[in-house]
Structure formats: structure tokens, C-alpha cells
């Protein structure tokens, strides 16, 4: 089993690589129907028009987004799971408690 190389000064931090990958995904999904499908399944995402819209900016309550993405991810949507990872990373959703994956 391969182990990841330790992070050294000057190397990418783990979330830097995830952020870079997310940026590529957002560029590829600009006109995608994925977010429209998520919005139909989870009204909490109604303000999202593009993939990058499902990650709320700092200062916005992330709990509704995280709960909605968790519900979509629980249905087997890997992209929603990836979005949830980024939405939840800077502040737990909801604070101090795990996100429920089942409705």
C-alpha cells in the first residue's frame, strides 16, 4: 500500500490540490444539468445555477447547503459528495455535529 508523501515546505497542502481540482470541475460543468438536478431534489440549493454556486461564500450559513449536498451524496452522487467536502471544510456543517446522510 502506497502512503502519501509528507507535506514539506513549498509543496501543496491537501486542500490546495482539492481546490485546484474543484476549479477544473467547475470550468467543465458550467452548462451542466447536474446542478439543476440537485436543485430539483433539494430546494435548499435553489440559488445555485452553476457548480461553484453550491459552495457558499464566507459569512453565509453553510448548514442548508451541506445538508442538501449530503442528501444528494447519500443517493450515490460522487460529485455532490465532493462538493460537500469543500462546503464543510472551513466550518463544520452544522457546527460541532456531523451532517446526517440519510433523510
Image (cartoon, rainbow, N blue to C red):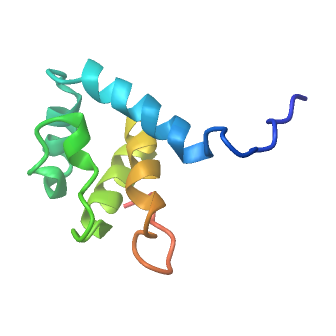
- Please report the residue visible at 50 percent of the width from the left and 38 percent of the height from the top: 18
Observer-nearest of 102 and 54: 54
State the count of labels.
0
Residue in view at x 61 percent, y 39 percent: 12
Instruction: Give the residue drawn at x 23%, y 29%.
Output: 34
Reply above or below: 61 against 87.
below
Query: Is 35 positioned to the left or the right of 73 in the image?
Result: left
Return the residue found at the far right: 1
How far from the left and from the top, in percent, is residue 88?
43, 60
Answer left or right for 95 relative to 55: right
State the image quarter where residue 102 is shown.
bottom left
Residue 77 x/y as whole percent: 40, 35
Quadrant (top left/top right/bottom left/bottom right) for the C terminus: bottom left
Residue 4 at x, y percent in the picture: 79, 36
> Can I make out residue 78 in this image?
no
Asked if residue 97 lies left or right of residue 93, the reply is: right
Q: Nearer the viewer, residue 17 or 32?
A: 17
Residue 35 in sight from this viewpoint = yes
Quadrant of the image containing the N terminus: top right
Residue 67 position by quadrant: bottom left
Instruction: Residue 63: give x, y in percent of width and height.
Output: 31, 69
Query: Residue reaching furthest bottom?
Result: 96
Amino acid at each position: 500500500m502506497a502512503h502519501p508523501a509528507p507535506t514539506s515546505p513549498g509543496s501543496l497542502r491537501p486542500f490546495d490540490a482539492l481546490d485546484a481540482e474543484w476549479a477544473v470541475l467547475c470550468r467543465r460543468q458550467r452548462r451542466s444539468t447536474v446542478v439543476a438536478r440537485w436543485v430539483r431534489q433539494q430546494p435548499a440549493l435553489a440559488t445555485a445555477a452553476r457548480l461553484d454556486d453550491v459552495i457558499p461564500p464566507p459569512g453565509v450559513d453553510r448548514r442548508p447547503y451541506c445538508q442538501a449536498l449530503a442528501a444528494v451524496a447519500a443517493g450515490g452522487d460522487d460529485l455532490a459528495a465532493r462538493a460537500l467536502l469543500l462546503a464543510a471544510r472551513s466550518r463544520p456543517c452544522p457546527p460541532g455535529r456531523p451532517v446526517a446522510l440519510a433523510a
